[in-house]
Amino acid sequence: MLTIRRGIIMKKTFKYLFSLFAVAALVFTFACDQGAQQGKSKSKTLTNTKGKGFVRCGVSQGLPGFSNADESGNWSGVDVDVCRAVAAAVLGDADKVKYTPLSAKERFTALTSGEIDILSRNTTWTLSRDADIGLTFVGVNFYDGQGFMVRKDSGITSTNDFQSGLSACVNIGTTTELNMRDFFTSKGISYEPVVFEKADEVVAAYDSGRCDTYTTDKSGLAAQRTKMQSPDDHIVLPETISKEPLGPVVRQGDSVWEDIVRWSLNVMIEAEEYGVNSSNADAMKSSENPAIKRLVGSEGELGAALGLGNEWSYNIITQVGNYGESYKRNIADTGILPDRGPNQLWTKGGILYVPPAR
């Protein structure tokens, strides 16, 4: 009799404990879901951006094709389009951006101090920058490499022609400066660095003959060459001495804002892959391809995962365009770099490849 009673008690005890565990699991799941939703709504940068009504974007002091202002103060370029995409996603209007021109030396301080919320300024993604100074790179919008420019009448046609004693103009506080040092050291070539904080100062110094060569990313050489008094008097040497993956940067500590900037860029690239552009986005809403329908907001609720409305990606595509449109408008059609090279889609021989928006 005692054994039976013990069995009944144990059975009731196990049933009670199981019920407690089930309730606890439900409470834990609910708390996690609530925490995740609150995390999205508590993005300080997102909240502040909506409150101000514009995105604060750090750009260069003038690099055609990437971030450059015209005489009326209107900014354009592939870096500018990243900030415009974020504004379209968050505020529904790509034009709601405040641009802050920054030198290479002051760009990271402006971001970490809170003066800007996105740095989209032909900035190279490196380990030390990503890990050591409170920054997070969210993607690559231009694959580049460092090169050298010389005057045609110098007789130099390759870096193999460089001789000790040459002078080189360069921006201070950049990976360019470090790469140049490593390159000349590895070749056993002594050189004189001629450094400036502002890019236009570097170009002016080289153009006036103060140095024998000018070095920066090859895209920058092609862009800055257009500013010189006689562009045809200069050539970019064929050698590429470094890897320069350029991309937008945000402060560490706000994962929601980080995701918003990352996926704003990703949408532009994936839209090109699927043939969705600013002209056909509306028609694509009736596509039979679920991936396309997600991009134009006619299927799924991807915006909710970022704390945004479901039209966020549609707004990017219709107001800014896909990556190919941005490249064509800012770089190819301006004659800077008509050949996209590695910046072509992975499906067309390039290395542009992003995770799927699903």
Image (cartoon, grey):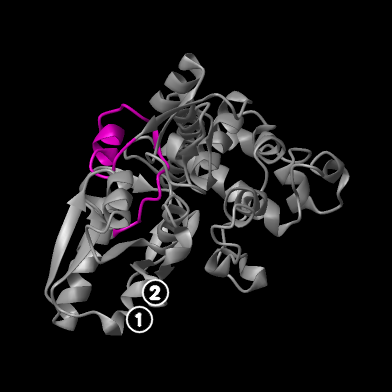
Residue 116 in the magenta stretch? The answer is yes
Taking 162 as reference, is 200 above or below it? Answer: above
Taking 163 as reference, is 141 above or below it? Answer: above
* Of the pair 7 and 75, the residue shown nearer to us: 75
Residue holding disc 1: 158
Query: Total label count?
Result: 2
Q: Are marks 1 and 2 in contact (CB under 8 Å)?
A: yes
* Of the pair 168 and 49, the residue shown nearer to us: 168
Taking 166 as reference, is 286 above or below it? Answer: above
Residue ranking furthest to the top: 51
Residue 280 percent across, percent down from the top left: 82, 44
- Determine which quarter of the picture holds residue 317: top right
Q: Quadrant of the N terminus?
A: top left
Amino acid on which disc 2 is placed: Leu
* Of the pair 203 and 229, the residue shown nearer to us: 229
Residue 175 percent across, percent down from the top left: 26, 58
Determine the main secondary structure of the stretch shown in magenta.
loop
Region rendered in magenta: 102-126
- Determine which quarter of the picture holds residue 238: bottom left
Residue 49 percent across, percent down from the top left: 46, 22
Q: Is residue 139 visible?
A: yes
